[in-house]
Image (cartoon, grey):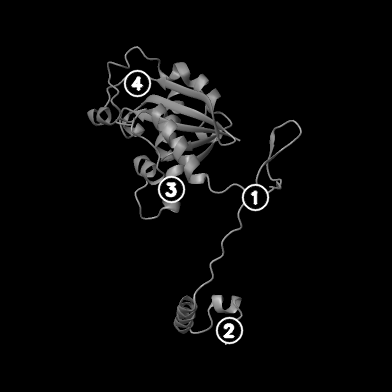
Amino acid sequence: MRQIILDTETTGLEPAEGHRIIEIGCVELINRRLTGNHYHQYLQPDRDIDESAIEVHGITNEFLLDKPRFADVAAEFLDFIKGAQLVIHNAPFDVGFINNEFTLLGSGLGKVQDHCQILDTLVMAREMHPGQRNSLDALCRRYDIDNSSRSLHGALLDSEILADVYLAMTGGQTSLLLDTENETGSAVAGQEQSVQISSERPRLRVIQASADELAAHTAYLEMVDKAAGGVSVWRELEGEAP
């Protein structure tokens, strides 16, 4: 499975107001592994950048003067993302800007959705963590991901951070079984492995509950029975149902 983690920086907030993309950053995942393959491009937008946008990403009009225009890189960019699943935080924003750039070209490229599947990690985060902050910075704190290098937004840096966030959000537990190795020495997932425990290993110590602890346990279960208006699951499992 090929996924592209994508982010853009722009001259402002609304393509309908003539704002354009000024930076694209993408990193590639294949089968949930970073490949080291990426796409990164600054773009000349042929318009001024809003001051409020410069405060966010730090990209200036002067810096972009000698950079290519979107038309110069559109084919290369589309070739990089085509057929992949795009993973984007707040996808309507970035996809809306890319679709606007495709429209301005007038070359029949269609929309991003014609070439790629789209996964919005902001929607995913809101479903997983309702009522909480789900910005990229907030998710980094929640999943203990280092974003100390992110004093300003940057498309490639944000894509790299989002890749870590996405993998943490979707990681979970992949298998209860140990991997074994086949005859060639490569790992084979999903096969049980026998582990020989040394005869010199000391026996595990078993500590029995005291009479006071057993009495307290019984009293607690009786309280649960009363609150539930019936017999608790624990009492049924222990065969103590009256």
- The residue sitting at the left extreme is 51
Residue at 48% x, 45% y: name it: 169
Q: How many labels sit on residues?
A: 4
Looking at the image, which is closer to me, 130 or 16?
Answer: 130
User: Looking at the picture, which amino acid does disc 3 mark?
Assistant: Ala
Label 3 sits on residue:
125
- The residue sitting at the top extreme is 66
Kindly state the secondary structure of the residue where label 1 is placed: loop
- The residue sitting at the right extreme is 183
Res 207 seen here: yes
For the residues labelled 2 and 1, say whether their Cβ atoms are less than 8 Å apart: no
> How far separated are the C-alphas under marks 1 and 4?
72 Å
Among numbered discs 1 and 4, the one appearing first in the sequence: 4
Label 1 sits on residue:
200
Among numbered discs 4 and 3, the one appearing first in the sequence: 4
Kindly state the secondary structure of the residue where label 2 is placed: loop
Residue 65 x %, y % = 32, 14
**Foreground label between 1 and 4:** 1
Residue at 30% x, 21% y: name it: 47
Left or right? Give the position of 86 relative to 90. Answer: right
User: Looking at the picture, which amino acid does disc 2 mark?
Assistant: Ala
Task: Judge whether 138 appears above or below 129 on screen.
Answer: above
User: Looking at the picture, which amino acid does disc 1 mark?
Assistant: Glu
Callout 2 crowding tier (Cα within 10 Å): few <14, some 14–19, many ≥20: few
Task: Judge whether 190 appears above or below 148 on screen.
Answer: below
User: Looking at the picture, which amino acid does disc 4 mark?
Assistant: Pro
Label 2 sits on residue:
241
For the residues labelled 3 and 2, say whether their Cβ atoms are less than 8 Å apart: no
Label 4 sits on residue:
45
For the residues labelled 4 and 2, say whether their Cβ atoms are less than 8 Å apart: no
